[in-house]
Image: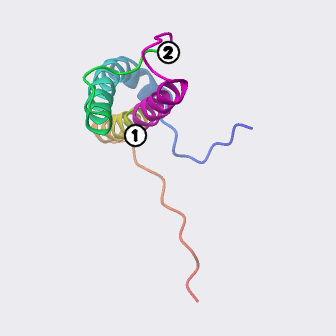
Amino acid sequence: MNRRDGNELSGLAKLAYKPIGLFFGLIGGLLAGKVFGIVWKKISDEDETPQPLSDDYSTREVLLAATLQGAIFGLIKTAVDRYGMKGVRRFLDTPRPPAHRRAEV
């Protein structure tokens, strides 16, 4: 179901965001890889992260590493997308629709 709530970027803003989004996506991916490496090193006391096909790690370690890596990547990608969208919107000065407020009693 595709529901529009008025918070999507307009056609011009989407077009302007594409090259910016690609650039920030690459930077975000590199950052996520670095953050994952640092976090894994702290929790496992190992310099290298487990590779899925390596016999040097248990299945449990490989699955834990993949879960952690996915969570870190998802967090950073979402943050990059959200702040990128806000930056483009601010740059293009596209007015944001008013937030829905509860009726005061």
Residue 48 place in picture, x, y as percent: 30, 19
Task: Between residue 89 and residue 40, name the one nearer to us.
Answer: 40
Mark closer to the chain start, 1 or 2:
2
- In the rendered structure, which amino acid carries the disc numbered 1? Arg
Give the quadrant of residue 2.
top right
Is 68 part of what is drawn in magenta?
Answer: yes
Give the quadrant of residue 72.
top left
**Which residue is denoted by mark 2 in the rendering?**
52
Image: 90 above or below 65:
below
Give the quadrant of residue 46.
top left
Q: The C terminus is located in which quarter?
A: bottom right
- In the rendered structure, which amino acid carries the disc numbered 2? Pro
Dominant secondary structure (helix, strand or loop) of the stretch shown in magenta: helix
Task: Between residue 19 and residue 65, name the one nearer to us.
Answer: 65
Q: Report the label total.
A: 2
Is 51 part of what is drawn in magenta?
Answer: no
Give the residue displayed 68% in from the left and 42% down from the top: 3
Q: Regarding mark 1 in the picture, which secondary structure is present there?
A: helix
Are dots 1 and 2 in contact, CB under 8 Å? Answer: no
Residue 78 place in picture, x, y as percent: 43, 37
Segment tinted magenta in the rendering = 52-75
Residue 19 place in picture, x, y as percent: 35, 17
The image's mark for residue 45 is none
**Which residue is denoted by mark 1 in the rendering?**
82
Give the residue displayed 43% in from the left and 50% down from the top: 96
Colouring = rainbow
Give the residue displayed 47% in from the left and 12% down from the top: 55
Task: Between residue 68 and residue 86, name the one nearer to us.
Answer: 68
Residue 103 place in picture, x, y as percent: 58, 79
Q: Label 1 neighbourhood size at 10 Å, few (<14), some (14-19), many (20+)?
A: few
